[in-house]
Image (spheres, helix red, strand yellow):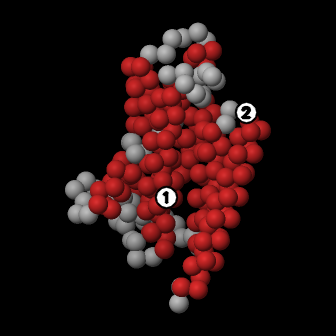
Amino acid sequence: MIPLHFSHLQALLLFALLISLAFGTLGRRKPIERVKYAAWSFAMFLLVGITLGWLMFPFSR
Amino acid sequence: MISSPQQEAGETPSPARAVAVALAGWLVPGLGHALLKMWGRAMAIFLTVGCLVYLGAGMRGNVFVPGGEDAFSRLGYLADLGTGSFYFVARALEVSGADVSHADGDYGTRFLATAGVLNLLAALHAYEAARGRKA
């Protein structure tokens, strides 16, 4: 198969999107609640991931 | 208590059937929910686990094999095995082997492990739904 290359942000976005969709589908029954939960989960993944990234930045060099 | 479509249809929950549903869901991601006629969830799990496995293998993540030397390898193998039959798909896709010397490969390893843990979570969810506990 063709090797896939992603930047850190692209990998984070892909991971957050896929897991959030699964969480939304598994965690809620009604479609609107699924969308809300998936959106919330996606936002939290990004917020926590980017925050942790910046917190580690001073120690990266 | 929220019931699954089977309870709504008047079917009695059977522990043996619930175990069979969970095993089916582990072996083929989404099959457990498909057996319970939860089509949306079945499709979502199949596609999510499938995408994670494909991306993880494409990024040349580490597909752990049995008999690892350290605890990390053994835990990684257990997590990868969580994808059921997709474990062998990952091994078949990754013909050139793992390359964790770059960030891509490291992320790929996490994608594969997450696919396995997510599938185990989905199988447990299918078990609970088959028992009529929640859905």
Quarter of the image where the N terminus of chain B is located: top right
> In the image, what residue type sits under mark 2?
Lys
Q: Quadrant of residue B98?
A: bottom left
Above/below status of B50 relative to B73: above
Q: Position of residue A18 (x, y in %)?
A: 60, 52
Give the residue at mark 2: A30
Q: Residue at x 53, y 90 (%)?
A: A61
The chain holding disc 2 is A
Q: How far across and down, in percent of the image, does residue B79 sit?
A: 39, 51
Quadrant in which the C terminus of chain B is drawn = top right
Residue at x 62%, y 67% (from the top left corner) = A49
Mark number, residue B111? 1
Q: Same subunit under labels 2 and 1? A: no
From the top left corner, tell me how far across and down residue B46 is, in percent: 53, 41
The local secondary structure at tag 1 comes to helix
Horizontal side, residue A31 vs residue B33: left or right: right
In screen coordinates, is B41 left or right of B127? Answer: right
Q: Position of residue B41 (x, y in %)?
A: 60, 35
